[in-house]
Image: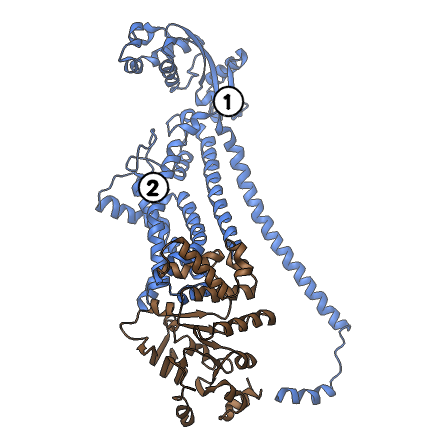
Chain colours: A blue, B brown
Amino acid sequence: MGVSQATPSSSADRVPTDWQSARMRRRVESRYRAERMFKLAGLGALLLAGSFLAFLLFTIVRDGASGFRHSEVRLSVHFAPQLLGIDHAAVTGPDAAAIIQRGDYVGLMQATTAQLGLPVDVVSEGAWLELRRTVADDPTVLGKTRTLWLPVTSSIDQLAKDKFDLTQPVITRGVSDKDVAAWRSLERRGLLRTRFNTLFLTEADSTAPELAGIAGAALGSLLTVVVALGLAFPIGVLAAIYLEEFAPRNRWTDMIEVSINNLAAVPSIIFGLLGLAVFLNFFNMPRSAPVVGGATLALMTLPVIVISARLAIKAVPPSIRDAALGIGASPIQLVFHHIMPIALPGIMTGSIIAMARALGETAPLLLIGMRAFVTDLPQGLASPSTALPVQIFLWSDDVQRGFVEKTSAAIIVLLVVLLLLNSVAIYLRSRYERQL
Amino acid sequence: MTEVSGRQPETGNAAPLKIAARNVSVFYGAKQALKNVSLDVSSEQVTAFIGPSGCGKSTFLRCFNRMNDTIDTARVTGEIRLDGRDIHGPDMDVVQLRARVGMVFQKPNPFPKSIYENIAYGPRIHGLARGGAELDEIVENALRRAGLWEEAKDRLGESGTALSGGQQQRLCIARAIAVDPEVILMDEPCSALDPIATAKIEELIDDLRGRYAIVIVTHNMQQAARVSQKTAFFHLGSMVEYGDTSMIFTNPVQRRTKDYITGRYG
């Protein structure tokens, strides 16, 4: 009331505002200028971030694309039974499989490569496995000659992919003159070809780059993440439901909330130390095992899942809560019939992002021994294994030139998996937002 | 204050007593939102609570089905009896109480489920139907009584949230009716609706009268005059006056009631 009485008297002797005056126009202009500057700065930040990402992806793809391909040499292999030490008659007997396994394929390999007349080994040291597989698949091949494409050594492979600067002196270019000569000879004779490297996707780690694959690490990662999710998801969601819906608000629950928020910010290597102390040293669980890695990563992701689940539960409209309680739903019915269906997409989004983080986690896994050199696919949750990011770390540390492209190729695989996981999370979130 | 307590024991023309509230106070933390209110609700009439915003009328309404229990800081003192039994007593189960005393909220709040599921949910959790056919019947009856059957019978599988605002509110009323309550509490059920939807809800309240004890909180005094037989006027957490609606609107005893009804404040 007081204001409305005071204004007429004061506005009577005030000059009406001239919105077209030079001063006003300057104000408008400077406001527009500020807006333009702000937009430009924002766009600049976006472009800068985008260019970093593009540079990262470009270098990884440039180095890694060739990791999915490998070179093969054409060889005519005569599967002579006497060379292999396999009795021709025995391969139809009851112990055929065992006899075929025992054959001297390395000797056959050496005899075959000697035909090439080259001063160095051009065939990969693991190529004899391919010979054994050929005989095991078709025992009638014994005594006959087959033309096979076999993986070459890493040096020849890298030469075939043009990875060396041959104008450099021998000492700095990283490849011997003998290898170069062997490669030139094979090229001239048309015995080389480059094909998609299935070994990379089906094999585990190896000391020879041309034989190393990511399947072991990928399977180890899968098992680890499954264990982590299996432990962290139910425990985290139950804790979140209890804290949001049932726990009284007091000093204790406040303290728990603060602790959870702090735990979410604890560096992952600390969780690795915790896993080492508790699971390995106290409970004597197996070293390098996915079950321990999963349990350690579960500890790490638990706070993140609790926080995201609490947020999702909190976001359920209170009107739904009123409606359910008003009709006489018990607190448990309220949670499972009404709150969870609405909150679940949000909880899953948070959990998937937490799992994506766990999948890319290296430090805690190093501490519990998942940096082991494992040449077999993991046979179970307790068998020694490694994980994708750890494999990348191990390969990036290797001195052999052939592992450079393997490192980048493994990074590509890891990024694709993470991209898929995050896409699922975004899809779930957008569906959830449309629903409400 | 003396006039108030002098007036309230008379329950009108000896209508059957459903709810008896005595000296009910509600505190939110240290703040007292409702001061010592005593009031009787008849089982065959519509009782309206009117008063300006923040006067405690909704708070009082929420005492009848103990919805204030869901607010951590809320504390209720005094006594409320439903059919003579203390609703805060140890032998009173709050879930059953809320089935007996249904509630319709200010904003239509159907579950994000199908129309059928919205209605069937209450009977299902309270075990009121022995089989699908019986449940279908309950759903149809509830929708018929809420005047929504003709509009909804061909789209029972559609989401309840796809209905218009007025239809959603009638769905919420049908949902409350489906568990066959004795009392229906309505907390400003028309405040989010347009005049046509409001008229339909008022008509519905009139139809439901006699079958259920109805308590309605409203901002709209014309609405209170139209639908209720008893009216209580609240101001600043106290009940100022309670009596027959016709008396309250034509010949209020308290000066504050008269000022509010004639639009002096509110």
Which residue is denoted by mark 1 in the rendering? A195
* Residue A94 vs residue A169, the one in the foreground: A94
Quick one: label 1 or label 2, which is nearer the N terminus? 1
State which mark lies toward you, 1 or 2.
1
Q: Residues within 10 Å of mark 1 (few under 14, many from 20)?
A: few
* Residue B259 vs residue A38, the one in the foreground: B259
Q: How many marks?
A: 2
Percent of width and height locating residue A222:
38, 38
- Relative to A93, is B59 on the left or the right? right
- Relative to A184, is A340 on the left or the right? left
- Relative to A385, is B159 on the left or the right? right
Does residue A189 sit above or below B135 in this rendering? above
Does residue A64 sit above or below A315 in this rendering? above
* Subunit under mark 2: A
Q: Residue at x 47, y 59 (%)?
A: B140
Whether pointer 1 and pointer 2 mark residues with C-beta atoms closer than 8 Å, the reply is no
For the residue labelled by badge 1, is the local secondary structure a helix, a strand or a loop?
strand
* Subunit under mark 1: A
Which residue is denoted by mark 2 in the rendering? A366
Q: Distance from label 1 to label 2 (Cα)?
A: 34 Å
Percent of width and height locating residue A427:
51, 47
Q: Name the image quarter holding residue A376.
A: top left
Percent of width and height locating residue B85:
31, 77
Q: Residues within 10 Å of mark 2 (few under 14, many from 20)?
A: many
* Residue A50 vs residue B34, the one in the foreground: B34
* Residue A275 vs residue B41, the one in the foreground: B41
Any part of residue B220 in sight: yes
Amino acid on which the number 1 mark rests in the picture: Arg
Quadrant of the frame with the N terminus of chain A = bottom right
Any part of residue B190 in sight: no
Q: Do badges 1 and 2 share one subunit?
A: yes
